[in-house]
Amino acid sequence: MRKGIVPGTFDPITEGHLDIIRRASCLFDEVVVAVAASLGKGGTGPLFSLDERVELVRTSVQGLEGVSAEPFEGLLVDFAREQGATAVVKGLRAITDFEYEFQMAAVNFELNPEIETVFIMSPPQYMYLSSSIVRELAALGGDFERFVPPCAYRALLERARA
Ligand code: PNS
């Protein structure tokens, strides 16, 4: 039984994330989408609470066999070990992702060499996509429906109207 972790902030989940999760589910028997309580690269606080972000991921992965979502706090490698996972799966978009992801993979390896980091390349149509771009489009009234699953679209519209 091979278990992989797909970690992230998911503020909110996008179609780019879903593409990586779907492809990870082809490589592992079980995939746990790990929603971080704290922010990674982002500076300011998240738009959605941890509970909201987990719920949006859970709704979006319904129907994907072997895929679940859980919140986590603290070190990713500790969460992966607690879950009995052997690998962390991350999406790589453009070259700009590389340095940060390289650093994280190196630190995680140093902390626990038994947890492998696996990278999946984003397809061209999602190379430019990020949660922050989608949040900005939503706030400024741009069309972003095709970039996010329907539950995240509704949640962003509600937030933008509030
Ligand atoms: O969506 P993101 O910003 O790419 O997600 C980054 C995340 C949450 C995967 C990363 O920040 C993370 O793993 N945070 C947990 C803390 C940790 O283990 N840091 C690495 C060692 S300092």
Image (spheres, rainbow, N blue to C red):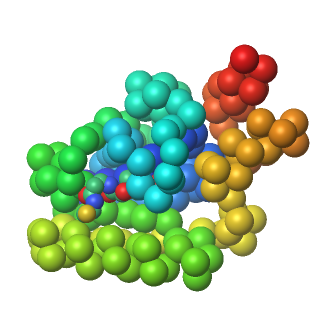
Horizontal relation, residue 138 to residue 66: left or right: right
Along the line of sight, which residue is nearer the eye, 160 or 15? 160
- For this orientation, the residue located farthest to the front is 44
Along the line of sight, which residue is nearer the eye, 8 or 126? 8
Vertical position of residue 142 compared to residue 102: above or below: above
Q: Residue 45, how many percent across, how many down? A: 49, 39
Horizontal relation, residue 105 to residue 56: left or right: left
Query: What residue appears at the point 26 percent right and 79 percent down from the top-left corner?
Result: 106
Query: What residue appears at the point 77 percent right and 36 percent down from the top-left corner?
Result: 139
Q: Residue 145, how many percent across, how many down? A: 80, 39
Vertical position of residue 76 compared to residue 102: above or below: above
- For this orientation, the residue located farthest to the right is 142
Along the line of sight, which residue is nearer the eye, 35 or 29? 35
Give the quadrant of ligand 1.
Answer: bottom left
Residue 35, quarter of picture: top left
| Quarter the N terminus occupies | bottom left
| Quarter the C terminus occupies | top right
Along the line of sight, which residue is nearer the eye, 47 or 72? 47
- For this orientation, the residue located farthest to the top is 162
Q: Residue 16, how many percent across, how many down? A: 62, 55
Horizontal relation, residue 5 to residue 62: left or right: left
Does residue 58 appear in the picture of this structure? no
Horizontal relation, residue 77 to residue 102: left or right: left
Query: What residue appears at the point 50 percent right and 52 percent down from the top-left corner?
Result: 43
Does residue 94 appear in the picture of this structure? yes
Q: Residue 92, how many percent across, how many down? A: 52, 71
